Amino acid sequence: QVQLVESGGGSVQAGGSLRLSCTASENIVSRNSMGWHRQAPGKQRELVARIYSTGSTSYADSVKGRFTISRDSAKNTVYLQMNSLKPEDTAVYYCARWTARGSWTSWGQGTQVTVSS
């Protein structure tokens, strides 16, 4: 069973930056689509960034131009660089991998991001 471990969260002021990391227990980050998701209190979990096995990327409109997803296959790690952070980016951030069955799986424990105004 693949395990994903997120890290890099923290508390920053609006306009600041953070880089999240998601490290996999197996060499899967370039073989699977990988996604960063977030869940704010009282809200549904949402997909914010995705990197496909081809290397192409997609983003939610709310983070486009501010967040960048990337991967380092040698380190089995996917990153989420978050710039120009806003208070509405406050959430627990999770990474997951996309399966051939068409669902997200191998959820990590999440990492908290708090942005103050």
Image: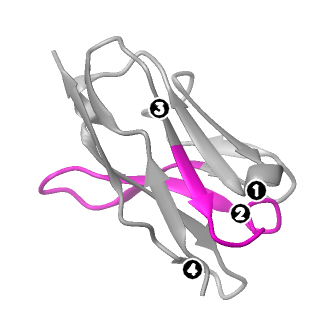
Residue denoted by label 4: 103
The three-letter amino acid code for the residue at tag 1 is: Tyr
Residue denoted by label 3: 63
92 vs 105: above or below? above
Q: Position of residue 22 (x, y in %)?
A: 55, 53
The three-letter amino acid code for the residue at tag 3 is: Val
Image quarter (top left, top right, bottom left or bottom right) of the C terminus? top left
Residue 55 in sight from this viewpoint: yes
Would you say 89 lies left or right of 82 here?
Answer: left
Q: Give the range drawn in magenta.
A: 21-49
30 vs 113: above or below? below
Residue denoted by label 2: 33
Residue denoted by label 1: 52
The three-letter amino acid code for the residue at tag 4 is: Ser
Residue sticking out furthest to the left: 42
CA distance for labels 1 and 4? 14 Å
